[in-house]
Image (cartoon, coloured by chain):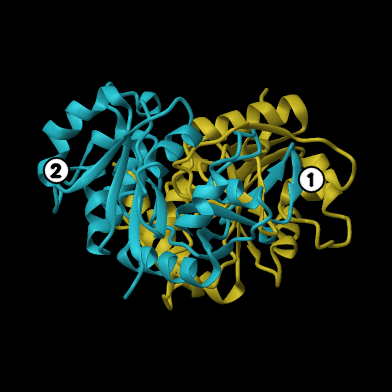
Chain colours: A yellow, B cyan
Amino acid sequence: MSPKRYALLVAGGSGTRMKSEIPKQFLLLKNIPILAHTINQFLKCNCEIILVLPSNHSETFKKEVLHFCNSQNMLLAQGGNTRFESVKNGLDLVSKQGLVAVHDAVRPLVSVEIIEQSFKYATQYGAAVAAVDLKDSIREHNKARERSNYKLVQTPQTFTSELIKKAYLQAYKPSFTDDASVLESLGHSIHLFEGDYKNIKITTPEDLLVAEALMR
Amino acid sequence: MSPKRYALLVAGGSGTRMKSEIPKQFLLLKNIPILAHTINQFLKCNCEIILVLPSNHSETFKKEVLHFCNSQNMLLAQGGNTRFESVKNGLDLVSKQGLVAVHDAVRPLVSVEIIEQSFKYATQYGAAVAAVDLKDSIREHNKARERSNYKLVQTPQTFTSELIKKAYLQAYKPSFTDDASVLESLGHSIHLFEGDYKNIKITTPEDLLVAEALMR
């Protein structure tokens, strides 16, 4: 029997960078809310959905998003003040042993292939993270760096439930830049696998245009 | 009198990453070759164009691109085996004192505003480089890094002709990741200014779709 799969979707953003009153996860992409696209991709991969939303967004979600989702059967967790707290709240709803894919709700273009790979590598290595090469040159504190030494990290970041739950028992540290870094702080290594340039994070109005183009 | 302005456009690529026989600078974007878009943006800013092209591409350029350009008056330099050599060949055609904006030919979405800023800051600081913040998390050799310490570097990278010519008299070093790093190797600092997420480098077929979307 294959292990139970959870998708922990973090939709914490308030949408200020989008110059929009509507939080970006609710904006329409090809007439469907961004969040519904994301949820449906993980449903295709037989995941149980745990959606972390700021509490004042849950009404909007139920009214505007839920009927676009291919299943209404999902768990809602309350968003925290930080991403760390939001993920922690979501993990409290992981009741069975299995695998947990943590994913930014505003990455609706994640492919089924990438999700499946994240579960495959998480089974094999305990922790798997999608990452891509840089296309531009890079500087650190205004010093030129060799870009081939770097990777840009996306989500899903997928873990065994045991590992990620244990990792989130730690107190928050500023060095926790993503879920993988929370795990590494326990001394556990992660497996990077090839992500997808199309799997963009929608954070600006231009990103919405880009996403529409990439969906064609 | 404002200083003489050169745009040194580097079109060295052979197009293999585009899965296309046609080098990517010749591909059409809204029915106009990418390269013509780029040239026209710098013409709008009163630049003399120095175009660095592999020698076997100059016929294609004259047949397919030149008539889309808003001026036929430009200098052609021969592409080298490396980007360093290509820029060096282009700099040989900078005959007057002034400012030189070095720019990737496959960044056709560069705005007039960004070009003007690069000239303004190059006048002020001697060397100015467009750069943007990272949207994704970043890792170096699979170690999580704080993304706010990093910037992604774009072009134009704009310099006084004196400084950039002097910098390119150096022998090539592997640490030369871009033009700015060539200058810094002489001990000169550069000024980073806020670039533009739309100013993408077209290196994959998806980038072409994205560029079309961003032009709307």
Q: Give the numbered dot on residue B31.
A: 2
Residue kind at label 2, given as amino acid type:
Asn
Given residues A162 and B174, the one toward you in this image is B174
Q: Along the horizontal axis of the image, is A76 left or right of B26?
A: right
Q: Is residue B155 visible?
A: yes
Given residues A163 and A66, the one toward you in this image is A163
Q: Residue at x 46, y 66 (%)?
A: A24
Given residues B108 and A40, the one toward you in this image is B108
Q: Residue at x 48, y 44 (%)?
A: A199
Q: Along the horizontal axis of the image, is A2 left or right of A165?
A: left
Chain under label 1?
A: A
Residue B81 vertical placement versus B87 (above, below): above
Chain under label 2?
A: B
Instruction: State the residue position of label 1.
Output: A164
Given residues B197 and B90, the one toward you in this image is B90
Q: For the residue labelled by badge 1, is the local secondary structure a helix, a strand or a loop?
A: helix
